[in-house]
Structure formats: C-alpha cells, structure tokens
Amino acid sequence: MQHTTLENGRWAELSFPQQMANIGSETARIYRALEEGKESRAESAFARFQELVDLTIKSGRTDATPMLRSAMLEELCRFRELYCKAYLERDLPELAAFNRYLDFFCFFRSSTSRRG
C-alpha cells in the first residue's frame, strides 16, 4: 500500500469531490505515462489509482443516506471496472474521456479551496 497515511482514516475525512480529484490526478499520470511510452510509471500510477478507488469504496460515505450511499458505491465499482478495462486494453481515447470527467472534480476542488 502506497497510501498508508490515507488508509488510517485521513481519506474518509476528505469530501467525495476531493477524493475524486485525487483519483483524477492518478489517472492523468497514467495517461501521460502511456502517451510517453513509460510503462513502469503507468503501472505505478495505476496501482495508486486502484488503491485510491478502493479506499473511496471502503470509506463508503457514511454521511449519505443509505439509498445514496448504495448508488454511489455501485457507481464507484462500475467506474473502477470500466477504467481498469480501458487501462488494460490501452484504450487511450477512453482513458482521455475518463480524465475529462475527473477534471470536473479537480476544478470543483480548486474553486472551493480558494473560497475558504
């Protein structure tokens, strides 16, 4: 586990958009490494991506209603499945689409951090 400090509870303290923005940072690293042909870097970032998604699933947003929590977990699991498939197939256009989706969380995070 590369994110041991996050596993010890710090990850669950982050908001869902903050968690997704951090996951987006890893997917951007994966994409860039694949574009540059740096397989080792891509593999390392992919391992970190999986850890962060798994921590997000494990933390389970206990502040959400049971129905919302269930839907979020289902979507996160599906997201992980589809991203892993695109990564293993080296489907760069699909990986780029995931990055565009996750960029919204990065923009949200940066806009809310400037206010506070």
Image (cartoon, rainbow, N blue to C red):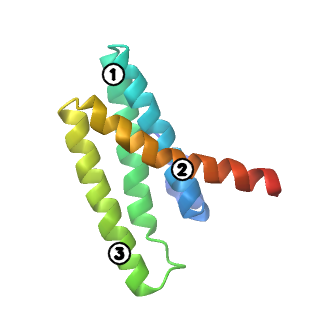
- The residue that disc 2 covers is 104
Q: Residue furthest right?
A: 116
Q: Secondary structure at mark 3?
A: helix
**Based on the displayed image, in which of its 4 quarters is residue 100 positioned?**
top left
Dot 2 or dot 3, earlier in sequence: 3
- Mark 1 or 2: the one toward you: 2
Q: Which residue shows up at 51% across the image and 38% down it?
A: 25
Quadrant position of the C terminus in the picture: bottom right
- Closest to the observer, 68 or 42: 68
Is the C-beta separation of discs 1 and 2 under 8 Å? Answer: no
Q: CA distance from mark 1 to mark 3?
A: 32 Å
Quadrant position of the N terminus in the picture: top left
Q: CA distance from mark 1 to mark 2?
A: 22 Å
- Mark 2 or 3: the one toward you: 2
Labelled disc at residue 71: 3
Q: Is residue 25 visible?
A: yes
Q: Which residue shows up at 30% across the image and 52% down it?
A: 80
62 to 113, vertically: above or below: below
